[in-house]
Image (cartoon, rainbow, N blue to C red):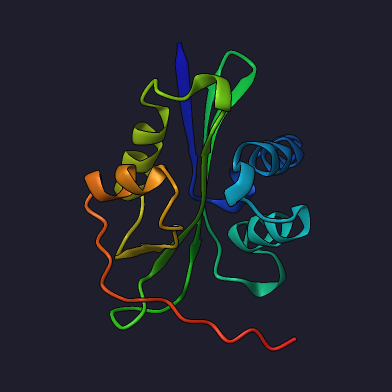
Amino acid sequence: MMQYNVYKTPDLFPATEEAQVLEFLFKHLEQYGDAKADIRKCLDYARGRNWKPGGIIITAKEGLQLTGAVIINFTGMQDYIPENILVYIATHNAYRGRGIGKELMQLAIAHTEGNIALHVEPDNPAKKLYEKAGFTNKYLEMRLNKQ
């Protein structure tokens, strides 16, 4: 049976699970993922480390097996920038098609206050999940990477 855990208070997220979530996201985001160092920064932000606003971490487990994870970071903004950024959502590749991603998305929406933004590549199959959940594409994102 699938068990979902929502951690809205950073202190309640077990430190023992942090490395597991990091490794899980690195592996199961596949070609849409980021480097471990970037995922670590996102986890630190969600946990409120270094005076960051914090966030929400949601996990799905079947027994001891981590089957899904979500990280939402609070922006500390309102209205002109959404209050929440859904940074990562992933389902274990062996458990896809079982509704875990949908349940994780519903929990993310239910446990956030204010609007939620996310970024998705046009060819990402998860785009359909986001659209079914009510996400729309209002803007074209443009970035200037100053390196």
- Between 2 and 29, the residue placed more toward the observer is 29
* Tally of numbered tags: 0
Residue 57 in sight in this render = no
- Between 101 and 32, the residue placed more toward the observer is 32
Q: Residue furthest front?
A: 123
Residue 19 point in image, percent of width and height: 76, 40
Residue 95 in sight in this render = yes
Residue 10 point in image, percent of width and height: 59, 52
Q: Where 63 sits versus 102, above or below?
A: above
Quick check: 88 left or right of 100?
right
Give the residue displayed 63% in from the left and 49% down from the top. Answer: 11
Give the quarter of the figure containing the N terminus: top left
Residue 142 point in image, percent of width and height: 46, 81
Give the quarter of the figure containing the C terminus: bottom right
Q: Where 10 sits versus 94, above or below?
A: below
- Between 31 and 20, the residue placed more toward the observer is 31
Quick check: 125 left or right of 134?
right
Give the residue displayed 45% in from the left and 76% down from the top. Answer: 76
Give the residue displayed 29% in from the left and 65% down from the top. Answer: 114
Quick check: 24 left or right of 134?
right
Give the residue displayed 47% in from the left and 21% down from the top. Answer: 3
